[in-house]
Amino acid sequence: MPDSPLPTPPPRSWWQRRVTDPLLGLLRQGLTPHQLALTVVLGSACGVIPVLGLTTLTASFAALRLRLNVAATLLVAHLWSPVQLLLIIPLLRQGALLWGDQAPELTLDKLRYLLANDWLAALHLLWQAMLGALLLWAGALLVLGPVVYFMLRPLLARVMPRETQPAE
C-alpha cells in the first residue's frame, strides 16, 4: 500500500494570520503561567481604573516594575476601556457618598450648576468623588485581584505549551 500523504491543514484566514496569531504570540512571548496570570490581572486592574488617562501610565509602570511584558499588559488594559467608561460614573457617585455628609450628592445637574456658578466647589466635589472612586477601585482590586490570579494561574499552566527540558 503506497504511503498516503497527510492531509494538509486548511489555509489560515487573514484574520488568524494578521490579528490572532500575533496577539497570541505577544501574550505568550517568554512568559511563564505565573507572569501571564499576573499580566492579565494587572492589565485588567489598570484597565478599569476610574480616572481617565491613568491606564497607560499605571499599566506601564506596573509591568516595568514587575518585569512583565509591557505590550501584553497594555493590550489587556486597553481591552477593558469600554468597561472603564461604563464604571466611571457609578464609581464617582459611590466615591462621593464615601465622604458622608461632607460631600454633596454627585449628579449631572449639580455638576453643571456648580461649573456655571462656583467652579471651585465643582472641583472640590469632583476631587472628593475621584478619591472615593479610587478607594473603591483599590478595595475591589485587593479582593478580586488575588482571586482571579489564583484561578488563572493553574488554567494557564495547563493550556500553555511546556518548554522543552534540556537533555541531561
Image: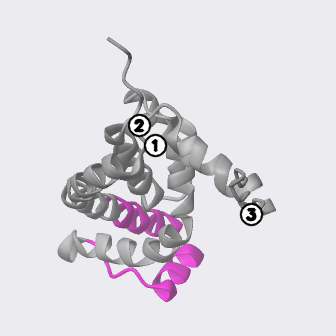
CA gap between label 1 and label 2 equals 6 Å
Which residue is the site of mark 3?
A: 10
Q: Residue at x 53, y 44 (%)?
A: 27
Rendered image: mark on residue 58: 1
Which residue is the site of mark 2?
A: 62
Badge 3 or badge 2: first in the primary sequence:
3
Badge 1 or badge 3: first in the primary sequence:
3
The stretch drawn in magenta includes residue 129: yes
Tag 1 and tag 2, C-beta contact below 8 Å: yes
**Image location of residue 140, percent across then percent down:** 25, 62
Q: Which residues are magenta?
A: 103-131
**Image location of residue 134, percent across then percent down:** 33, 58
Q: Is residue 95 left or right of residue 107?
A: left
CA gap between label 1 and label 3 equals 42 Å
The stretch drawn in magenta includes residue 17: no
Q: Quadrant of the C terminus?
A: top left
Q: Nearer the viewer, mark 1 or mark 3?
A: 3
Q: Nearer the viewer, mark 1 or mark 2?
A: 2
Residue located farthest toward the bottom when viewing the structure as drawn: 109
| Front-most of residues 3 and 145 | 3
Q: Nearer the viewer, mark 3 or mark 2?
A: 3
